Amino acid sequence: MSEPRMLPSKKTGYNPQGIEEHWSAVWEQAGYSHADESSPKPAYAIVIPPPNITGFLHVGHAMNNTLQDILIRWRRMQGYNALWIPGTDHAGIATQNVVERQLQEEGRRREDLGRDEFVKRVWRWRGESGGTIIRQLKRLGASCDWVRECFTMDEPRQRAVREAFVRLHEDGLIYRGERLINWCPRCRTALSDIEVEHEETKGFLYYISYPLADEPATSLIVATTRPETMLADTAVAVHPDDPRYNRFIGRCVKLPLTGRTIPVVGDSILVDREFGTGAVKVTPAHDFRDDEAGKRHGLDRIALLDEEGRISAYVAKREAQIDDSLFDEIVGAEVTEARKAVVRRLRERGFLVKVEDHSHALGKCYRCKSVVEPFPSTQWFVKTQPLAEPAIRAVEDGRIRFVPKHWENTYFAWMRNIKDWCISRQLWWGHQIPAWYCLRCDRDNVVIGGGTSAGLGIVEEVKPLEPIILPEAQPIVASEQPGACPRCGGGKLIQDPDVLDTWFSSALWPFSTMGWPEQTRLLTRFYPTSTLVTSFDIIFFWVARMIMMGLKFMGEAPFREVYIHALVRDAEGQKMSKSKGNVIDPLEIIDKYGADALRFTLAALAAQGRDVRLSAERIEGYRHFCNKLWNSHQFLSRHLAVLGGALPPLNSLSLDLADRWMMSRLQGLIGTVTDALEGYRFNEAASALYQFLWHEYCDWYLEIVKARLTSSASRNQQEAGVAVLLHGLETSLRLLHPFMPFMTEEIWQQLPHQGNSLMVADWPEADPAWRAPEAEDSIGLLMELTRAARDLRSDLEIPPQRPIRLTLRTSSGEEDRLVDAIIPYLSSLARAEKVMYGQHLDRPPAAAVALVAGIEVHLPVDDPSVFATRQQKLRRELEKVEQELARVTKKLSNADFLSKAPEEVVAKEREGHARLLDARAKLLQHLERLDQIMH
RNA sequence: GGGCGAAUAGCUCAGCGGGAGAGCACCUGCCUUACAAGCAGGGGGUCGGAGGUUCGACACCUCCUUCGCCCACCA
């Protein structure tokens, strides 16, 4: 299967095109990424964070899935039965929005289609477009077990969701009730607390005068950011210990504009005496804190807004008692319009005392960024506290470990203060809640054709879409629709119109993907999974809920380790977003540089606990690394061919110092990379590979062997060199394969190898027998001496090609032995035709000298005048620079020039000045160095 | 208001009790037959500030400064 595809031309180097497609196809056909549940090998499992079906692969996905793939490929090579389950998420709101936008382009709304047709249409869309992200993951090289691909809304997952819902309901952990919830008027659905993003927003603080009902000359002044909600106020609160106001507690004030009478209550929790005036208007229907206070004081909730965030006619008239002229103006108006109208009226009638600038955090929908309204509504909730407690313990006692550990704090903070989870959504796309109502038993509580699902029934102009289920209705919860009402035996049943929060099905993912609620072999074999790889922004949305549900339904935490990776930002540290136009498209990168370069870059940048700044230049740098490796393979292959292909086994060859050094370094590399991966230090593994391959393997060892191959070295010496080169490269390819699967496979296939694919080759193990500390010391010394010799050569401006002579003055017999062993290498690397050494060597009459690890290195010069010549040359240059510098300095100190010359001319002179200073410093340095080396 | 994190070479960042490092950028010299997407060499940092612990601190502790981020119902 290893026929070489295109041999790249010398100038272009490694070209990933064709190679990546080829190996993807080969791997998939061979089924290497398929994990068999009957295999006796130890299990290692990851479930993918399912990307939205609406999604396109962005760098965040690329990072996330590269890291998962590195782990999976590495464990698979280590001999684990490695399972990576892929899948996608139905993404309720996001997907519904996409299809609604499509409809909009056709001039239609989802209401025109009706629920069933609309849902069919979404499924059709999913069939056509929902597979994009999976194809893109394949291009990245993700070695998922593709035949096990799941979807959060496919049939098995629907069963799991219904089962989980029913069991939670049976255990009293799911309930239906009327609560203040977060409502997105644009999506027209309830949201959970964490789906609301708070954003600091500039606004105003309005001071409004509320006259006492029985003493109109006296007023309480309240401060509010939302004057329009005063129409739904049901009290004014003051602090009971506030001497300014506590005498008013128990009396009433008259609401401006409507004249409705509301009580003054004392509340030490709600009221901060320092803020505003110390008197607060209380609007329980539209503010969470006010709602709490309302409960404490038995206040009514007047829900002033309808589902689209407009002033409701019904409420305005009946409940809020708004007078006719204002009524006409504000009914149907959106909040901001209503606010303007109310403020204008208040001002006209003298109730508006003052307005101050004020900024505060405003809640916005995480999907559409609309301002979210707190809103009383009947919804389904998960009672989270009983689920959270064991989930907290699982992390506390280390059954689940977060990496980096500090994310555990974030997790604890949220879990210990967890609120009930609103799981119902007023959408059409999603898992419809498995609850039914009997039209006979519940006929008073179910209103067909009477309004909308949020239970408000107050949008009179909008044709009702769904039955209204009043809070008092008695749901029949079952995993399948009952044939008839179990209570009365005959009533017709209708299903609850709401669907579940997308994250409900995601919470079941680690076991629903393995076939739960069936007791499958997959589950027994692979649950709990090993590692979860994700980013911090979904710790609450997903990680915490999976832990709760896993413990609840499986009795065991769903994973042992949670690796939280960095967020990918652009080169300036900004979050990438389409609107900012700073998005790096991983697919463009793959087209241009190859998936391997992208993957390696992401791994190299994935240091723990920090955001990642990604730029094209960075990726280009690692593309060079691909190329470097590719070329070293070209070199090796050529010489393998010259030697006739089959080499004797390594242990039958006699290896010299450099060979043993390479073997020893290689053992170190194996240890470093393996340890780094164990600790999720991807960047450390990547940079160890980079450093080793580029600088030790290519720059030093390959050059050493090259010298041997072009000289009259013995066949054994040549074979030993090539054999070690081959072994080093082959081993490195294994270590590198999880990072760069495509290129490593391609090279590996072209080299002599055993087995069908690098993807299923064994992970290297360090062999202590190859450790050779003495060889590492010797070659270390060789490197230093070589650098010193090259350095002296360049100081004397001796061209690289011209051979030199060297003498080394040692200081002990031990040094002599060390030096003796490396002389042949030094000669070739430093291009020295003759190297002498010894403890009693005289320093040559004229020489450049350097000191390396106690050894004096002499580069003799035939003609001592070279120093003088060089010195003179440098001095002349220095003189010229000094003159020029003086001229520029003078010019720059001329006030006339500075004030009259054009700005850019002055700037240019300044630049020149800086450059000259720089040049002078360098020349002085050179002269100083010349002083040091000449003798 | 609470919590978390960061400050190291011009830029982006590793390191985290005994050597201040990498990539890119910069300077010098090389088209040396694997690679100019390269090779050889080089310059450049009182590791944010102040104290403390220690034989020894860039690393550990305290405080300060400056930037991020997350959570939170000051109307």
Image (cartoon, grey):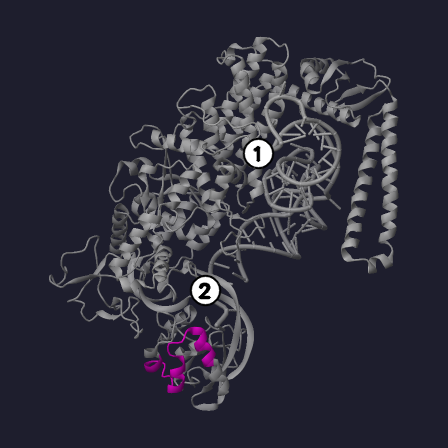
Q: Decide: few, some or many residues near mark 2? Use Cα within 10 Å; few <14, some 14-19, many ≥20.
A: many
Give me the residue at 37% from left, 39% from top.
A529
For this view, does A717 lie left or right of residue A532?
Answer: right
Is residue A209 visible in this depiction of the protein? Answer: no
Span of residues in magenta:
A316-342
Left or right of A325: which side holds A427?
left
Q: Name the residue under label 1.
A: A624
What x and y, as percent, mark residue A858? 79, 20
The spot of residue A452 in percent (x, y) is 28, 68
Tell me the distance, in whole angstroms, between the alpha carbons under discs 2 and 1: 47 Å
Q: How crowded is mark 1: few (under 14 residues within 10 Å), some or many (20 or more)?
A: some
Instruction: Work out which quarter of the rendered image holds the C terminus of chain A and state it.
Output: top right
Tag nearer the camera, 2 or 1: 1
Residue at far left of view? A490
Task: Please name the residue that numbered disc 2 is placed on.
Answer: A363
Residue A509: in sight, yes or no?
yes
Disc 1: host chain: A
Which one is earlier in the sequence, the residue at label 2 or at label 1? 2
Q: In the figure, is residue A395 to the left or right of A702?
A: left
Residue A805 coordinates in the image, percent (x, y): 77, 16
Please name the residue shown 21% across and 55% down the image.
Answer: A478
Majority secondary structure in the magenta region: helix
